[in-house]
Image (spheres, rainbow, N blue to C red):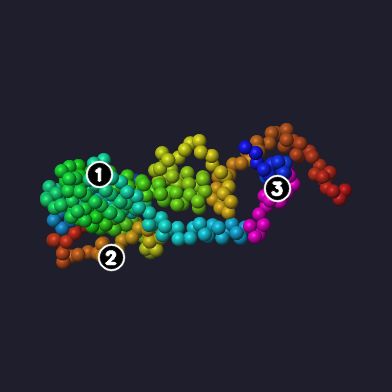
Amino acid sequence: MTVSDGRPHPPITGTASAVDGSVTVEAAVGGGLRAVHLTRTALDQDGAQLARTVLAVAARAAALANQRANLAFQRTLGRSTDDLLAGLGLSFPADLVAEHEDTSDHGVMRR
Amino acid sequence: MTDPRRTTNPRSATETSSATEPRSATESRRTTEQLVADAEERLRRTEGLPARIEAIRGTARNEARTIRVTATVHGALADLEIADEALALGPDRLGAEIVRLAAEANQAALAEGLGALSPVLGDAGTIDLARSIGLDAMIDPDAPILPYTPGIDPNADHWQVIDTPAATTPDDDDYALTFDFSSLRSDR
């Protein structure tokens, strides 16, 4: 996706999944939920546990979307836009977007 | 019901400030003190506004009251409660219900955010923002839009209090070309 191709761009989104893949959330910039995919195994836990998992996965999906938006703004403006994003209330905490190479098999997956 | 002020003073407050009174001509020009007060009022209204907007939460529940979603103005999930009974919906419907309620909670947060911003934006700015964030349904088409809010002048771009004068006719142009402007000079 480039800025100058003249075609409408697909929305910037972030997707994250739970450790076991039972919960996958796709979020837009800002964190608005675009999709929540649950597997059968997601319903093996009780409601409160599932809610906590969805919240955690959604927070990572939102942080990823915000980080991608930040990168897009950076590329367009040619300067750091961290402050701009922070001013808009769009955060991407390092612990939510950091790469976990060592836990990629069993940590939260991101794509 | 009789207004006691009316009986003692026939000139009501509206009469004294009527447009024909010479006093209103000076009132329409704001003094330096008033302009400073206006600026201070604007600062007061915008103080901590981003933090206030950030703190806003909207909430939505499903009809069975088994799912409760809380969202920020950006739509991010702030809280989620799922009762065990809601698991009976099955994975697909439960996931879709969370998405639907999150959007509803986001709209509730946006509506509150709009309310928090409206004293700063003024009427016209509030309506523009309502449209841009998808809250068109909240706009009352018959609501009066005040062109000016004391101390806040965000509607300046939208002023249309006086109709733009109609384009001058060719006759007027001829008159302007032949008119001797020196006849207006007071020193002759």
Image quadrant containing the N terminus of chain B: top right
- Residue under label 3, please give it: B24
Q: Are marks 2 and 3 in contact (CB under 8 Å)?
A: no
Residue A46 highlighted magenta (yes or no): no
Vertical side of B27 occupied by B1: above or below: above
Range covered by the magenta-colored residues? B20-34
User: In whole angstroms, how far apart are the C-alphas of marks 1 and 2?
Assistant: 35 Å
Q: Secondary structure at mark 2?
A: helix
* Residue B127 % position (x, y): 47, 44
User: In whole angstroms, how far apart are the C-alphas of marks 2 and 3?
Assistant: 59 Å
- Residue under label 2, please give it: A94
Q: How would you rate the neighbour count of disc 2 (Cα within 10 Å): few for under 14, some for 14-19, many for 20 or more? A: few
Chain ID for label 2?
A
Residue B23 highlighted magenta (yes or no): yes
Between A78 and A73, the one lying in front of the other is A73
- Chain-order first, disc 3 or disc 1: 3
Q: Secondary structure at mark 3?
A: helix
* Residue B84 % position (x, y): 17, 48
Q: Which mark is residue B78?
A: none
Q: How would you rate the neighbour count of disc 1 (Cα within 10 Å): few for under 14, some for 14-19, many for 20 or more? A: few
* Residue B164 % position (x, y): 63, 39
Please identify, in this view, whether the residue under mark 1 or under mark 2 is nearer the observer.
1
- The chief SS type of the magenta part is helix
Query: Are marks 2 and 3 in one subunit?
Result: no
